[in-house]
Amino acid sequence: MNAQEASELVWFKSSYSDGEGGECLEVAPCPTTIHIRDSKHAPDTGPTLTLPPAAWKAFVGFAAR
């Protein structure tokens, strides 16, 4: 993904996030890929994890237990 594509993603944080840059993840869902990043890193320079939607759904289901 290039810098322009990354800047076009719409990121959101959990409603549980306190907004002070703690240990939060940001997620930008797309039809074929779920993008995940650590909110403590600069938006265009930090690492991003990408998953297929099925893997994200399985993770969220496991985490909700």
Image (cartoon, grey):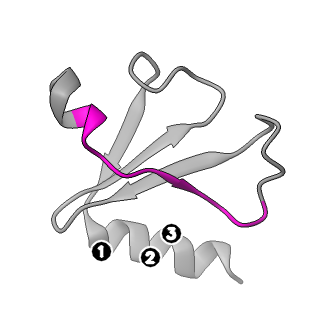
Say what secondary structure mark 3 lies in.
helix
- Residue at 42% of width from left, 16% of height from top? 45
Main SS of the magenta part reads loop
- Residue under numbered circle 1: 54
Q: Residues in magenta?
A: 6-16
- Residue at 66% of width from left, 62% of height from top? 14
Looking at the picture, does residue 40 appear above or below residue 31? above
Q: Quadrant of residue 13?
A: bottom right
Looking at the picture, which amino acid does disc 1 mark? Ala
Indicate whether residue 43 is drawn in magenta.
no
Q: CA distance from mark 3 to mark 2?
A: 4 Å
Q: Quadrant of residue 2?
A: top left
Q: Residues within 10 Å of mark 2 (few under 14, many from 20)?
A: few
Looking at the rendered image, the quarter that the N terminus falls into is top left
Indicate whether residue 10 is drawn in magenta.
yes
Say what secondary structure mark 2 lies in.
helix
